Amino acid sequence: MTFSTEDMARRAAREIPEGSIVNLGIGLPTQVADYLPEGHAWLHSENGLLGMGPFPFEGDEDPNLINAGKQTVTVLPGASTFDSAFSFAMIRGGHVDLAILGAMQVSAGGDLANWAVPGGKVMGIGGAMDLASGCRRVIAMMQHTTKKGEHKLVQRCDYPLTATRVVSLVITELGVFEPTGHGFKIIELAIGVTREQAEAATGAPLT
């Protein structure tokens, strides 16, 4: 039995220190907001919001309150809004403690590739490079393999890189893994997932 996306979001939420400033990337990471106790951390969105709350209930959406993925969100008491230039100054200045980002590939050395597939349509890099290089810690939250079963945790990325040596932890449906430089260290496996299954799905040695 593998982690559901909700399980992955809950597990990622456990990595967020109290009082920290956190940016959640587009896709799977946005779900992490739903599993944080109110007031535990300040969620930052690069389009200009600090103090983002969980997704609104149906009927309570405010079209003026959106995250970087253009999804409607809520704001917590004490939240602030600002322009994107100020938001990126926060990121580039090292004032965001943690980024949880989606990824297409992560290498054993912690390299991150999350903005383009070779030969595929490129929609734009957005804030990925700034977040990956400017945040104090980066966690990748992703599916362990592609839909074709190809490895996404690899010895060396062959997709265009977003940043090098930045990923400290990877959370997938199979478990939690730490890049070591030579491979990936198993921190935790989902209940029912065997080491052999994880090894077969990973393109680098597991320890």
Image (cartoon, rainbow, N blue to C red):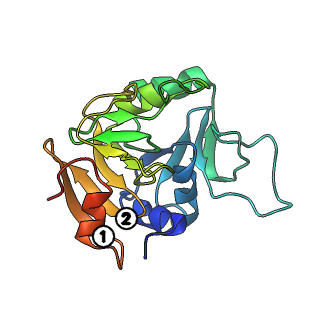
Asked whether residue 152 appears in the rendered view, the answer is yes
Q: Which residue is mark 2?
A: 174
Q: Secondary structure at mark 1?
A: strand
Q: Which residue is mark 1?
A: 189
Residue 136 drawn at (x, y percent): 31, 38
- Tag 1 near tag 2, CB within 8 Å: yes
Q: Is 97 left, or right, of 148 in this rendering? A: left
Asked whether residue 94 appears in the rendered view, the answer is no
Residue 158 drawn at (x, y percent): 34, 29
Q: Is 85 left, or right, of 206 in this rendering? A: right
Q: Is 154 left, or right, of 19 in this rendering? A: left
Taking the view exactly as shown, the residue that stands out farthest to the top is: 85
Residue 161 drawn at (x, y percent): 37, 26
**On-image quarter of the C terminus:** bottom left
Residue at figure coordinates x 52%, y 63% from the top left: 5
Residue at figure coordinates x 52%, y 24% from the top left: 119
- Residue 67, located in which quarter of the rendered image? top right
**On-image quarter of the N terminus:** bottom left
Residue at figure coordinates x 43%, y 26% from the top left: 129
Q: Secondary structure at mark 2?
A: loop
- Residue 77, located in which quarter of the rendered image? bottom right
The residue nearer to you, when weighing 11 against 154, is: 154
